Image: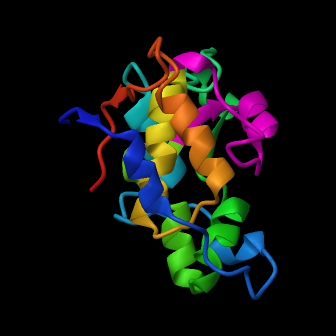
Amino acid sequence: MRRLAFAVVAFLLLGQGPPDPNEPFDRGRFGGFIDEDGDCQDTRAEVLIRQSEIPVTFRGQDECVVQRGRWTDPYSGQVVTAAAAMEIDVVVPLEHSHESGNWRLGNREKGEYLNDLTPGHLWAVHVSTFTAKNERPIKQYKPRTEFYCDYAASWFFAKMRWDLGSDPNEIEELRLMAVLNDPNGVEPCVSDLTPD
């Protein structure tokens, strides 16, 4: 993938969030992981396969359910080899996405959001990391500093791709994460993640 620098000014493009949701958040409306391409591997399996650092092994001969691999939890840095110890995290949490504009979507589109395989939208993380983050927005949860750049880029591109709004505090958090490694706090980092 080409490398992409996202300038601080780009964060302003996110603008203000849409009006408050006119319906309460309902996790059930996002559905669950699906097997979109009909190969028996659902979104969870697809993410585990893509993000494993070695070829994965499967439970059973049908190669539907991932059993083992080697994943470095990008949020914590923890190395994990058992798929059962992994969860799939949506970088912009479902509840936050609902509050930011996904409340306007129907059930099918909400399911597409949950199952979006665009790089950076879903991350394989250890179950303890998943629990720690849960539905927390960016101001309440951040990964290890080594992952700030890709996390901020993932968050930013998900917001852009799904036309989700952001408030000024969120934009400032993203900006601070993007310039963390610049001694002057001005030059944004460069991420390998790119939008569609």
* Rendered position, 126 above or below 123: above
Q: Is residue 153 magenta?
A: no
Numbered range of the magenta stretch: 123-146
* Rendered position, 114 above or below 68: below
Which sits in the foreground, 119 or 156? Answer: 156
Q: Is residue 133 magenta?
A: yes
Farthest left residue? 2
Q: Position of residue 133 (x, y in %)?
A: 75, 39
Q: Residue at x 47, y 49 (%)?
A: 156
Q: Which quarter shows the C terminus?
A: bottom left
Q: Position of residue 164 (x, y in %)?
A: 53, 67
Q: Residue at x 75, y 88 (%)?
A: 22
Q: Residue at x 80, y 34 (%)?
A: 132
Residue 139 placement, left or right of 55: right
Residue 67 placement, left or right of 21: left
* Rendered position, 191 above or below 135: above
